[in-house]
Amino acid sequence: MMTPEQLSQLRILIEERIVELEESIPRLEERVAPVAPDVAIGRLSRTDSMMNAGTVGLALKDARERLTRLRNRLKRIDDESFSLCGLCGKEIGLDRLLAVPDRGVCKACLQSVSRR
Ligand SMILES: [Zn+2]
């Protein structure tokens, strides 16, 4: 079980992460805007900016998914099951919750999920 102090520590962390993502997502969105042909000087620089847009696109997708997960986690922070793994039901542990606040699963389960 988590103490009220630990819970408020987590709540602050999650709220900070949400604010960070809400600020960074619009910036990423600007950067994935389609590359206009006249932006490019040569063929190489156009290819280069398209590649960057692809990388930024992945970062944007990841940021949006993380934001959704963090918001859902924040909604459930007062639930008794908040600190329990959503897959195996074991206590996740404060270190883990602080390190990966957007994931409601323990380290072992997250590893087995991402291996699939
Ligand atoms: Zn688990």
Image (cartoon, rainbow, N blue to C red):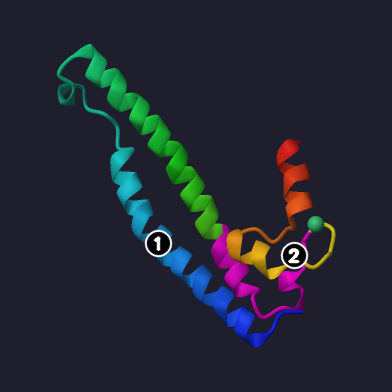
Quadrant hosting residue 11? bottom right
Rendered residue at 65%/73% (across/down): 76
Image location (x, y in percent) of residue 90 = 83, 65
Rendered residue at 59%/60% (across/down): 99
Q: Name the residue under label 2.
A: 92
Q: Does the residue labelled 2 lie within 8 Å of ligand 1?
A: yes
Helix, strand or loop at disc 1?
helix
Image location (x, y in percent) of residue 96 = 67, 62
Q: Can residue 101 be seen in this view?
A: no
Q: Quadrant of ligand 1?
A: bottom right
27 is within the stretch colored magenta: no
Give the vertical position of 71 relative to 11 (above or below).
above
Spot the residue most to the top. Answer: 43
Q: Give the range drawn in magenta.
A: 69-86
Quadrant hosting residue 37? top left
Q: Is residue 35 left or right of residue 5?
A: left
* Residue 20: mark in rendering: 1
Helix, strand or loop at disc 2?
loop
Q: 10 Å neighbourhood of mark 2: few (<14), some, or many (≥20)? A: many
Image location (x, y in percent) of residue 108 = 78, 51
Give the vertical position of 79 relative to 112 (above or below).
below
Q: Which amino acid does label 1 sit on?
A: Glu
Q: Which amino acid does label 2 sit on?
A: Ile
Q: Is residue 102 left or right of residue 32?
A: right
